[in-house]
Amino acid sequence: MGEGLTSAAPARLPARVRREWAALAAPAGGAAPLEPARLEGLPGPVRRWLARAIDPGTPLARSAVLGMRGEILLGRWRPFRARQVLAPGAGYVWAAAAGRRPAVVGGYDRLVGEAGEMRWRLLGLVPVMAASGPDLARSAAGRLAGEMILCPSSALGPGVRWSGLDDRRAVAEVRHGPWTHRLTLEVDEAGRPVAATLPRWGRPAGGAYAEHPFGAVFEGDLRAGGHTIPARVRAGWWPGQERWATGGEFFRAVIEEARFR
């Protein structure tokens, strides 16, 4: 998998965002391969996950480029196709088109450094969403922390500190700029990620921004470039609560391709 996926930015993105994409997707020059000694001292669930997620001798990637499809809750569930560059510690750009013709909404979400932004247009012409600012950036940093699971080598980065909870769960303190997020990762006996949860800044029910429980559920495997990551992701607010099933869950994706850089 991944042979047909290019690391180049989608052409429909603005020039400044294409430049950010290129910077995030730049390969990690001279990256050292993963050695078993790098996993020593980590909590058991994290060791199992990384030993399965990164083949021995695979260079530690700086970023991942992902191709995906799925459905997103925008009033109702709408199909989407998307590409994403994900560089934990640096940022991400998620570019997508959602809905069915003629009512297709296209645009992007991005976080680069401490700057977050959302820009979406109907038919590429009519603005339907434009947002930025410190609250959005803080929320986007929470998303970036949770998406560490899709770029496993980032779990060994200098901005991540692990502690164990039990045989299946560990907590990562993930720093990004001025924010620190506490991500709880659940891993099964075979080393597959099962779920990740964290308090995330947002306003899922409208009103003022505040921290709310956020989480993702992972299923299946995608093998690409010496890595194994989840093939299916479901994400949303209030995991484990009744509200998850009544509007909390808003994202369901199948990751079809991945390239690690």
Image: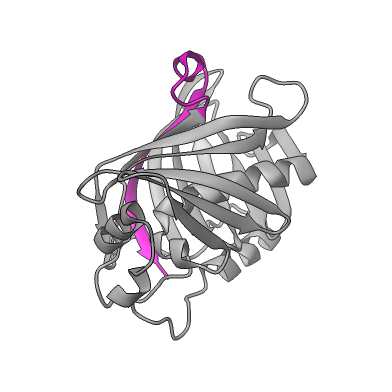
Indicate the position of residue 105 as horizontal and vertical percent values: 58, 33
At 48% from the left edge and 77% from the top edge, which residue is drawn? 28
Asked if residue 153 is positioned above or below residue 72 in the image, the reply reads: below
Examine the image and state in which quarter residue 53 appears. Answer: bottom left
Q: Is residue 145 left or right of residue 139?
A: left
Q: Is residue 247 magenta?
A: yes
Residue lying farthest to the left in this orientation = 190
Asked if residue 21 is positioned above or below residue 133 in the image, the reply reads: below
At 47% from the left edge and 57% from the top edge, which residue is drawn? 162
At 49% from the left edge and 65% from the top edge, which residue is drawn? 8
Q: Which residues are magenta?
A: 237-261
Which one is nearer the viewer's eye here, 258 or 166? Answer: 166
Examine the image and state in which quarter residue 218 appears. Answer: top left
Indicate the position of residue 102 as horizontal and vertical percent values: 52, 26
Which one is nearer the viewer's eye here, 23 or 233? Answer: 233
Q: Is residue 190 magenta?
A: no
